[in-house]
Image (tube, rainbow, N blue to C red):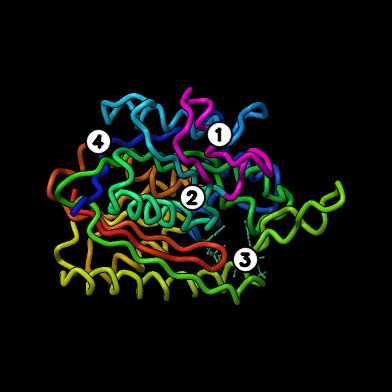
Amino acid sequence: MTHTRIVGTGGYLPAKVLTNRDLESMVDTSDEWIYTRTGIRQRHVAADDECTSDLAFAASSKAIAAAGITPQDIDLIIVATTTPDMIFPSTACILQAKLGIKHCPAFDVQAVCSGFIYALTVADKFMRCGQVRHALVVGAEIYSRIIDWKDRGTCVLFGDGAGAVVLKADDTPGILSCHLHADGSHQKILSVPGTVCGGKVQGSPFVRMEGNAVFKFAVKVLDDIVEEALAHNNMQKSQIDWLIPHQANIRILQSTAKKLGLNMDKVVVTVDRHGNTSAASIPLALDEAVRDGRIQSGHHVLLEGVGGGFTWGAVLIRW
Ligand code: ACO
């Protein structure tokens, strides 16, 4: 049976850094409030002439180089994003053109902050059925463009960035299991309710969130998904070497770590420097921990995330 291994990772953050201090001059907030409630100190913001596919291209180029392959070796591209360059073509197709390749299937997955977990799961299915030798899976977002910069309840939380992985078909895992869920009945507490109709934006094009309700929902489903992934693999909590959660709020990360009995030094944390980069947050954190040598061959790595939809999921990997 064919399995999926991650053989290259890459990340990209736009050059501009927006600190909590910068935000103090934009809305009624403070560095102390933001850091205490979220663990965030700063986030990156894309330049006006940068689009999501540019961020995706930069991250992908690094992942492809790390994998020791060329773009021509890629058989499948999946981009997880909630902030595509345009309504169509998909950001994955635009990325394909920027990579200078043709013919391989390319499409976007929209599952908000769980997008990378969803995209990785879909790619894993393609790999397991033997159709694909190398897949490129990307999480890329420019949330700064769907944020109301006058709303202190949301504008302090998000940032821009991209992370990418190259997957290779292999005889041994790799990805041990993938677990996805959704519950579409909670739109009221987290959404961007606007759309384009008749040439005009209809409704609000900005993130709306009831932070407290989202927080409670996130903690509950992340606890459940961690249990589900461990039970499926007949593994104990103590066998997890690294937890790579979606980076929304340090208090959510701490809660999941506590549930797993993991010290925080076994949790990869980027939220302090990146903020919440939605679908990009997990591959960015993964890339950081691979490149600085924390993740080593044979380690068990648990990726997990929750986002608008609601969607949530986990992927358990033997590195
Ligand atoms: N600065 C100062 N005060 C603020 C700010 C701010 N930036 N934002 C809100 N406040 C105020 C509120 O107005 C409120 O004031 P009041 O008591 O006078 O009414 C007070 O702070 C407390 O507000 P809460 O919303 O109750 O604060 P809470 O402790 O819940 O923290 C937060 C808010 C950080 C948003 C938290 O709820 C959270 O992280 N939620 C989860 C977010 C998440 O996980 N998102 C993941 C998915 S995102 C996606 O899928 C796109």
Find out whether the residues at labels 2 and 4 contact each other: C-beta distance under 8 Å.
no
Disc nearer the start of the sequence (2/1): 1
Q: CA distance from mark 2 to mark 4?
A: 22 Å
Q: Position of residue 249 (x, y in %)?
A: 46, 58
- In this view, the residue in front, 131 or 226, is 131
* Residue placed under numbered mark 4 in the picture: 292
Residue 78 falls inside the magenta stretch: no
In the picture, the quarter occupied by the N terminus is bottom left
- The residue that appears at 25% across and 48% down in the rendered structure is 4
Q: Is residue 164 left or right of residue 44?
A: left
Q: CA distance from mark 3 to mark 2?
A: 15 Å
- The residue that appears at 23% across and 63% down in the rendered structure is 262
Between circles 1 and 3, the one closer to the viewer is: 1
Query: In which quadrant of the rendered view does residue 309 lie?
Result: bottom right
Q: Position of residue 128 (x, y in %)?
A: 28, 53
Query: In which quadrant of the rendered view does residue 185 lie?
Result: bottom right
- Mark 1: few, some, or many residues within 10 Å (few <14, many ≥20)? many
Q: Position of residue 199 (x, y in %)?
A: 86, 46
- Highlighted range, magenta: 82-107
* Residue placed under numbered mark 2 in the picture: 279
Disc nearer the start of the sequence (2/4): 2
Q: CA distance from mark 4 to mark 1?
A: 26 Å
Q: Ligand 1 lies in which image quarter?
A: bottom right
Q: Position of residue 315 (x, y in %)?
A: 31, 59
Residue 101 falls inside the magenta stretch: yes
Between circles 2 and 1, the one closer to the viewer is: 1
What numbered label is drawn on residue 53?
Answer: 1
- In this view, the residue in front, 90 or 15, is 90
